[in-house]
Amino acid sequence: MTLRAPSAGAGAGRNWALLALLALASLAMAAPLLWTLLLSLKSNGDLLRSTRSAFSPPYTLQNYSDILGHSAVFGWLLNSTIVSLAVTLGVLALSSLAGYGFARLRFPGRAVLFIVLLFGLAIPEQSVIIARHQMFSALNLHNTYRGLILPGLAAPFGVFLMTQYFRATPRELEEAATLDGASRFKIFWRILLPLSLPAQATLGIFTFLSTWNDYWWPLISATDSDMYTLTVGVASSQMNFAQTNGLGYLMAQAVFASAPILIVYVIFQRYIVAGVSRAAT
């Protein structure tokens, strides 16, 4: 009995079917985003009559013009930018140093500390929120940038990712630099850190996106409207506009808040695959 190899036509058909399935899945995932964008381009009066008017012209940019004329939105945007950038830079610095220590240094209790770190990955934020709130309240850190930034610096995933990445880096590079008389810090700063840029970019993207989208802690810590981040500010606008005549304005705020993280992801997305695949080896 002879076996027939699958024909090229059958293989092409399966590829087209898989492509069509992926296209449908992508469309389903993008549908809420497209719906939000369409609503943001309609006047509030049209949406008050029926949201089905989003599928037909005329469209307008008036909602975005109203955002540009609302000073509070830019204050929320500035707060989100400051907090997200500060947390991202802090996590990159601390995670790189800790990851290098776990991967390359020998010190008492290293294995125990790493196990404790792994436990940190399994502890949900909600389980410590009361203790954190009481601690920050006692230190008068609520409604401050420090209160919004400091909790985000505890990043067990970042330390784990950088530890795995440094472990995957060949030791021969360090040995050669040691023979040339380089100090440990110089080896870390001049050799290992530049080699870890893919992992740094991956961790930076994940940290920036999660911090920008964070709603839970800013809602608790920032009770002053001047300290709202964009997520909390947009949510505070919902009770004023969503059920009245400002639905289009609310959707425009959502698009306005999502634009920065979309730009960041599009620019740096290639580093995510490179960093995760290298760390997994």
Image (cartoon, grey):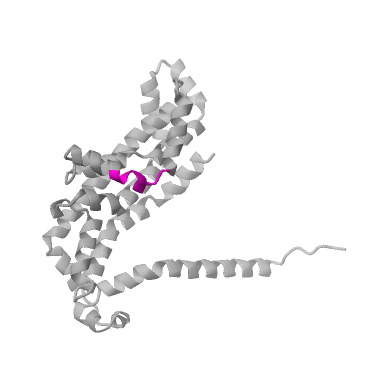
Residue 149, by quadrant, is: top left
Magenta stretch, main secondary structure class: helix
Residue beneath the point at 19% across and 64% down: 237
- Give the image quarter of residue 120: top left
Q: Is residue 89 above or below residue 101?
A: below
Q: Residue at the spot x=12%, y=63% of the render?
A: 70
Q: Which residue is drawn at 33% across and 51% down?
A: 209
Q: Is residue 167 above or below residue 233?
A: above
Q: Can residue 199 be seen in this view?
A: no
Q: Is residue 129 part of the magenta span, yes or no? A: yes
Residue situated furthest right in the rendering: 1
Does any portion of residue 195 appear in the rendered image? Answer: yes
In the displayed structure image, the side of residue 258 where residue 171 appears, left or right? right
Q: What stretch is highlighted in magenta?
A: 123-130
| Residue 205 x, y percent position in the rendering | 36, 47
Inspect the magenta stretch and tell me whether residue 7 lies in it: no
Is residue 93 left or right of 17 when viewed as pictured? left
Residue lying at 41% horizontally and 15% vertically, measured from the top left: 181
Q: Where is residue 58 in the image (x, y as percent from the top left)?
A: 24, 82
Residue 209 to residue 57: above or below = above
Q: Where is residue 212 in the image (x, y as percent from the top left)?
A: 29, 52
Task: Pick the residue in front: 121 or 60.
Answer: 121
Q: Quadrant of the N terminus?
A: bottom right
Name the image quarter holding the C terminus: top right
Q: Is residue 279 above or below residue 253?
A: above
Q: In this view, does 218 lie to the left or right of 167?
A: left
